[in-house]
Amino acid sequence: MLATFLFVLFCLSDWLLLRILPHLQLSFAPAVGLPLTASLLVRSGVFAALSGAVLLARRRRRAVGRAGHGRVRTGRVRTSSRAVSLFLFLNLGFSVVQVDAYVVEPLLVETTEIRLEYGQLDPALPPVRLVHLTDTHVERASHREVEVVRRVNALQPDLIVLTGDYLNLSYLHDPVAREQFRGFITQLEAPYGIYAVRGTVEPVPGMMAELFQGTDTVWLEQETVTLDVRGQSLTLAGVACSHDHVVDAARLALTLEGIGADELTVLLYHSPDLILEAAARQVDLMLAGHTHGGQIRLPVLGPVVTFSRFGRRYAAGLFQEGDTTLYVSRGLGFEGGSLPRARFLCRPEIVSIELAGAN
């Protein structure tokens, strides 16, 4: 009876946690049915396993202790007491994990700083600082966006690049979400500009035009732009992501036509799925997101899912394919729909890259 009471209490706490997230300005899922069901399954599994273990222990005691009823009764009390204690411990642990995933970790924005050296840049000149943001998945203005603006501007980047999935899929046509995304973007500061490409949440070019209307962001659609940053020259190549590999590979080939090997080329593409094609065309640096680093990672096992054709091979971080460097960011936001707005062992990420000349 005590375990049943605790089970109901924990389930109610799960429902309450999910319901207060919008009021805490953390996430704004339109429905909580799926994450609540997942929590219920975990807690039910614990309840069923411990109940089964108690019943099995009682049967064994009954079979071997028919001559000593007092001892059997004492054993039953001990078994039940231990089972309730273990049930309480496991469920409290699961509650702590959920609070971390829904409340704590989404706000623990991490800045990853790396330095890359290239022969096309002059080592005598100051390096170029590039900040990469991806998968913002804005629903409503939250504490996370405020922290990202503060951190990015403190880095004093020369330029900022964005690699797709700007609004959450659940709020794709929501005018408030669009306006608040524009408010977020316009607070970012970069003297040499902000450049963006389409992700998979932005299915058509018209949506990008609408989303970035009134901002100074330069949107690249199978286009390149060459920048001179205090005497250092680099070319940004932007390719839209459709998740049709044949189509996107053709887009990449078209975009890179005419770019010489002496030009430092930075490819902006939403997913890591074009890395082999980028390496074959000797792109110097490819920046991507899409995987969210798995968003939910399990100890030892790592990311549960990445939605990449390479599986977990390029889940997050720095990779080298031939002469091409790839960085896959964990991004800032969450998957949409009824999926949980949670991050576990996978903090939101700002990537700051210093591009310098090789000595």
Image (tube, rainbow, N blue to C red):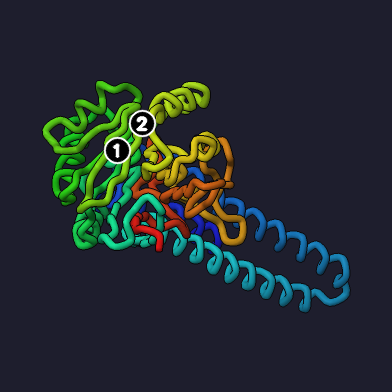
Disc 2 or 1, which lies upstream in sequence?
1
Residue 220, how many percent across, how many down? Answer: 29, 31
At which x and y percent is residue 252?
A: 43, 29
Q: Does any portion of residue 16 appear in the rendered image? A: no
Secondary structure type for disc 1:
loop
- Confirm or deny contact between disc 2 and disc 1 (CB under 8 A): yes
- Quarter of the C terminus within the rendering: bottom left
Q: Amino acid at mark 2?
A: Val
Nearer to me, 64 or 325? 325
Q: CA distance from mark 2 to mark 1?
A: 7 Å
Residue 195 in percent (x, y) is at 25, 39
Asked where in the image residue 214 lies, by quadrant, the reply is top left
Which residue has dot 2 on it? Answer: 201
Q: Residue at x 39, y 39 (%)?
A: 267
The amino acid type of the residue labelled 1 equals Tyr
How many numbered callouts? 2
Q: Is residue 124 left or right of residue 261?
A: left
Residue matched to label 1: 166
Instruction: Say above or below: 348 vs 84.
Output: above
**Number of other residues with Cα within 10 Å of mark 1, as a class: few under 14, some 14 to 19, many 20 or more:** many
**Quadrant (top left/top right/bottom left/bottom right) for the N terminus:** bottom right
Which residue: 45% across, 56% down?
A: 346
Q: Is residue 140 above or below residue 174?
A: below
Q: Is residue 1 above or below residue 341?
A: below
Direction from residue 88 to residue 226 in the image, left or right: left
Dot 2: what SS? loop
* For residue 167, side relative to residue 319 (left or right): left
